[in-house]
Image (cartoon, rainbow, N blue to C red):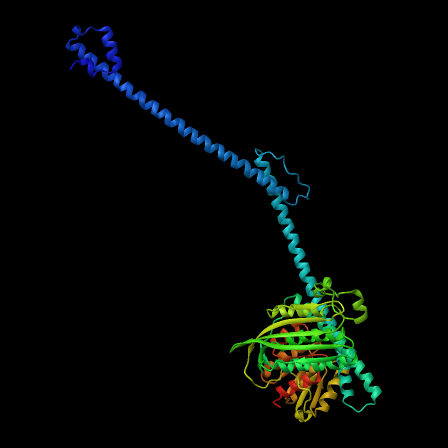
Amino acid sequence: MSINSALHKLLTKQVKKYLPPDQHDERLNEFLHVVNETYCTFEKEREFAEYLATLNDKHFAEINQKLKEESSQRKQSIEKLIKTIRSLDTNRGLELPEEDTDNLLDVIDFLQEQIKNKAIIEQELRIAKEMAEKANRAKSEFLSMMSHEIRTPLNAIVGLTYLMQQEDCPPAFMDNLKTLQFSTDNLYFLINNILDFSKIEAGKVELESTPFDFKQLVSNIKRSNQVRAEEKNSRIRLMLDDDIPDSLIGDPLRISQILSNLVSNAVKFTANGSISIETALLSKTDSEANIRVSVSDTGIGIPKDKQQLIFERFTQANSATTRKFGGTGLGLVITKKLLELHGSNIELESEEGQGAKFSFTLKLAIGEATKNINVLPEKVNEKTLDGVTVLLVEDYEINVKVAGKFLTRWKIQFDVAENGLIALEKYAAKKYDLILMDLQMPEMDGYTATARIREMDTTIPIIALTASATLNNQDRAFEVGMTDYVTKPFNPKELFIKIAKYSGR
């Protein structure tokens, strides 16, 4: 094979052009071989350089595209940042820089100023919140004080009215007493509604779980509203489902409050008509009963466009309603809230002039069929407490007289202490079966006196007998060691039963 066939194509072309074939000798061939190696090396390096150049162009394009994308994202982020800042409150004299996406440092400086302003606003909000909480505490204290101041004289009125009705009176005098009792009941109901609404709004109402006779409770509510219905030439019909268990577990006070609000409302707005209370057992398991309750009337009814309004606080369907029928507009609000605490809702069916029907369901645990005292009996045997000894701690003279009349009527032997200090002295000098303790008194209040007595005796029953009806007062009373709580104006039967219970009678 000739040397030309092994040479680089460019060198072969040049050799053919400038060197005749017969002039090749060994030394020339060696020279051509060296030159050929140079040509081949250069060719490889040129191809490699072109390949590298191609790779660099591709890599550069990728990097350039990435930089463009990052620049676009940065621009969008700054635009969003500026838009967000514009949505902030800038009412403190700060001006947002021009909407320039390259002006990032000024935007960040402005944002830092806004953050400082927000911190100031948050501090102001914290102060405002503390002031609101302080105002709420002041409201609670005011309600507690006003409750005490109103309930204290009201207790004397209620007590004396009850006592006088037990005596032989001329018919006209008895009518006056019934009117007086009706007015005091309304006033008492009004005070309780205001206090209950305050508790509910503060989220301080907790439901109890105690056994009670649901059917007896409903019957008592019907009976307590019967006289008022008759005065308006109306009658109350009660339909009880006998399949409802005799003993259920729940909060009888709150369930009674729900039903009382609905029944008393029905009586209030119905004249020359009828009110129906219906209960039905929807379903029952071994542990739970699902009960449907409805209260309907043939009264004035509620227009469709006002039916949601009546569940708002201090509101009635018509301003003329308040003037004609009275009330605060809190009863249905409280009823709705209490049912929500029970996991239920109030339902309303009504047309103007066609009466109204309120319904709800209750899921209550089934208790053991045992006799209980959560429903007050119609009559009590007043001889039951004969010989019981009681220390009555009370500073209000009228209430001492009223309570004394009841205790005397029940054949109870009692001593009176005008404040906590005197109560401690009398307790140390004599043994009592039970102590009735007022909470707010001069010299030493009932809380302190109870705590001091509990240091010496952990078993003697101490019943708070007080006009302070707020939940905080009740909690504090139990914390210092009081056994139970009776609120003024007290129901004489309730006081009788609690004395009988804790004195072992």
Between 414 and 268, the one nearer to me in the picture: 268
Q: Which quarter shows the C terminus?
A: bottom right
Between 273 and 144, the one nearer to me in the picture: 273
Residue 94 seen in the figure: yes
Left or right of 285? Residue 4 is left
Q: Is residue 308 above or below residue 99?
A: below
Between 108 and 20, the one nearer to me in the picture: 20
Image x and y of residue 423, in percent: 68, 83
Query: Where is residue 378, by image quadrant?
Result: bottom right
Q: Is residue 411 above or below residue 62?
A: below
User: Residue placed at 65% from the left, 45% from the top?
Assistant: 89
Residue 420 seen in the figure: no
User: Residue placed at 63% from the left, 48% from the top?
Assistant: 118
Between 51 and 158, the one nearer to me in the picture: 51
What is the tally of numbered marks visible in this picture?
0
Q: Residue furthest right?
A: 172
Query: Where is residue 9, by image quadrant?
Result: top left
Left or right of 494? Residue 227 is right
User: Residue placed at 20% from the left, 16% from the top?
Assistant: 6
Image x and y of residue 49, in percent: 33, 23
Query: Where is residue 334, by image quadrant?
Result: bottom right
User: Residue placed at 68% from the left, 89% from the top?
Assistant: 380
Image x and y of residue 384, in percent: 66, 92
Image x and y of residue 244, in percent: 59, 80
Q: Which quarter shows the N terminus?
A: top left
